[in-house]
Amino acid sequence: MEITENNLIKRLKRFEQKNGRVIRGIGDDGAVVEMAHGRYVFVQDALVEHIHFEFSFMDAVSVGKKSIYVNVSDILSMGAEPLYFLVTIGIPGSISYKEIIDLYKGMHRAAREFNVILLGGDTVETKSDFFIDVSMAGILKNDTYLGRNTANAGDLIGVTGWLGESAHGLHMLKNGKIPGRPCRFIKRYREPKPPYNIWKELMKRGITNAMMDISDGLIIDLERMMSESKKGAVIYLENLPIPNVLKREGKEHFALSGGEDYQLLFAFNKDKLQDFNEMKKSGFHVSLIGQVTRGKGVRILRNGKEVKIGSKGYEHFGVNL
Amino acid sequence: MEITENNLIKRLKRFEQKNGRVIRGIGDDGAVVEMAHGRYVFVQDALVEHIHFEFSFMDAVSVGKKSIYVNVSDILSMGAEPLYFLVTIGIPGSISYKEIIDLYKGMHRAAREFNVILLGGDTVETKSDFFIDVSMAGILKNDTYLGRNTANAGDLIGVTGWLGESAHGLHMLKNGKIPGRPCRFIKRYREPKPPYNIWKELMKRGITNAMMDISDGLIIDLERMMSESKKGAVIYLENLPIPNVLKREGKEHFALSGGEDYQLLFAFNKDKLQDFNEMKKSGFHVSLIGQVTRGKGVRILRNGKEVKIGSKGYEHFGVNL
């Protein structure tokens, strides 16, 4: 079946969701939405085949989910609830109609998990690259946003979930080590669902004052946060939430620089430590991994001793996916 | 100079504009904007090299401008003022650093013309396709949107500016007929600036009740509007605003099916005809080109006689760019 835009729009209308505030959805020059007064967050993040994913490692449903997750992750890390999204897909001749429908299926499923609504977008032909570019709007839970520039000296540093899972999953895929049963590492790589429940609890307790998602690796992303906040940080290696198998196999570096975990990294005032510990006791997976300092840069301590890192990255650990 | 994302972000910060409502701009996981209660319009439209443009026909500054114009056009045609945009650019190895900066220059210039503010976005590597994907938000001027589905039987049909200019410009470029002096046709093709002043006057007078921009050609787009409104239409060929040179050269079909004019097509109640005529007298370039009818489809009349059209398009005129 030929892929025409009119064709697609008709098919895609079945993925349309509405709420009382969507006045005009898919099918016009633009969508119309009624919005209350507030502070809104806008993000836009793309995935490109062969750059951000390979169909040999994940199917179109997972690609669709991931395209939503990476944007939801950015919205959450600003301290906002996701609301609406638009998406442009760039389609080369190599992509089948089924793959496009599967892509939208994946987006639709992921969107439902976060109650974020598809408003429209564009479908364009390309010569060879397949891409998905999602823009998303959310609304701040509180008046203050949780950015990268609001960490204070003395703040503690926390992280959600596990680190290095996604990099290990990709490593397994690249080496053809694909277990028959579902595998948390491969799942994390393919479908890095943001830790929504943990985020909600963090927000409810008002614990964090700076937050970002870990997309490029803990150290690089923490350096970005510290640079924007004009602060430094120390990280306690022994406190990092590293899966046992990574420790056994000497792959702790995946946790530091693997990237794509899409866990949340946050700074919080010491006054909130009790709240933080109560969360942990209630079963929320959060870890205290370091502290914000005056000065510049990120230092890594192993049992109190600084671990040396090279000028070009974290060669001590080696980054070799 | 190597194109790295950090590099680019730093360079691009100089294109950052702010207004009092932008609380956090470029440089975080997302932008934060304070928005008043209202009805907002969201659009997203991409341009892909070799599909939507060729660098042999237009430079990166024009591509940047066009990427903004096509989105502004969608926002205006819903009856909204543009406010904010985000942009993802997909960059293959063939694109130079200068071209990227020129692209942003073009976007910046076009954005200034409409007071629309860059909030952020993404830059991604691609294997071969160069693309620009802009998402844009605007706010409705009135509570009611001007969509494609709100034309009524008996309404008159109007259009802004000239039709066929852009197709003629592209035709000139394809045939190597490039005049030494500035050429309105080539200019329209490269930089189809939406008719903002005419739109403002139409909005001020509350003339229109359905509107869309002409991106794919008058007839196709009018058919879309009528299909969404569940109506039909007649078009008076002799009333179409066709440049004389197109008439002389027998290229009237460019006005019907050429596309990319990005003029506004609108339906309005007969009660507003006086207002419409006053606008014309004041020098606003608008033309009365037809009428909405009951039934289905678009009929074309030349001096009262129906012009036959083939099942696959408007073969009577021939579409041959």
Image: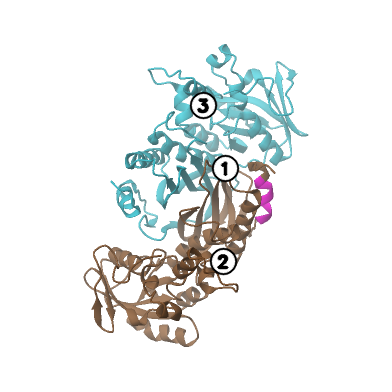
Chain colours: A brown, B cyan
Q: Given the image, what chain letter belongs to the residue carrying mark 1?
A: B
| Residue that appears at 41% across and 80% down | A248
Residue where numbered disc 1 is placed: B78
- In the rendered image, residue B61, in percent from the top left (x then y), is placed at 38, 35
Q: Amino acid at mark 3?
A: Ser
Q: Give me the C-alpha separation between circle 1 and circle 3.
A: 22 Å
Lateral position of residue A292 relative to residue B29, left or right = left
Callout 2 touching callout 3 (CB < 8 Å): no
In depth, the one of A203 and B251 nearer the eye is B251
Disc number for residue A114: 2
In depth, the one of A136 and B39 nearer the eye is A136
Q: Earlier in the sequence, mark 1 or mark 3?
A: 1
Residue range highlighted in magenta: A8-15
Res. B313 visible in picture = yes
In depth, the one of A189 and A71 nearer the eye is A189
Callout 2 touching callout 1 (CB < 8 Å): no
Instruction: From this view, report whether residue A183 is shown above or below residue B6.
Output: below
Q: How packed is label 3: few (under 14 Cα within 10 Å), some, or many (20 or more)? A: many
What is the residue that sits farthest to the left in this orientation?
A295
Residue where numbered disc 3 is placed: B166
Q: Main secondary structure of the magenta part?
A: helix
Instruction: From this view, report whether residue B242 is shown above or below residue B296.
Output: above
Q: Secondary structure at mark 1?
A: loop
Q: Amino acid at mark 2?
A: Phe
- In the rendered image, residue A287, in percent from the top left (x then y), is placed at 40, 80
**In the image, is residue B138 part of the stretch drawn in magenta?**
no
Lateral position of residue B220 relative to residue B9, left or right = right
Q: Amino acid at mark 1?
A: Met
Lateral position of residue B170 relative to residue A249, left or right = right
- In the rendered image, residue A107, in percent from the top left (x then y), is placed at 59, 59
Q: Give me the C-alpha separation between circle 2 and circle 3.
A: 43 Å
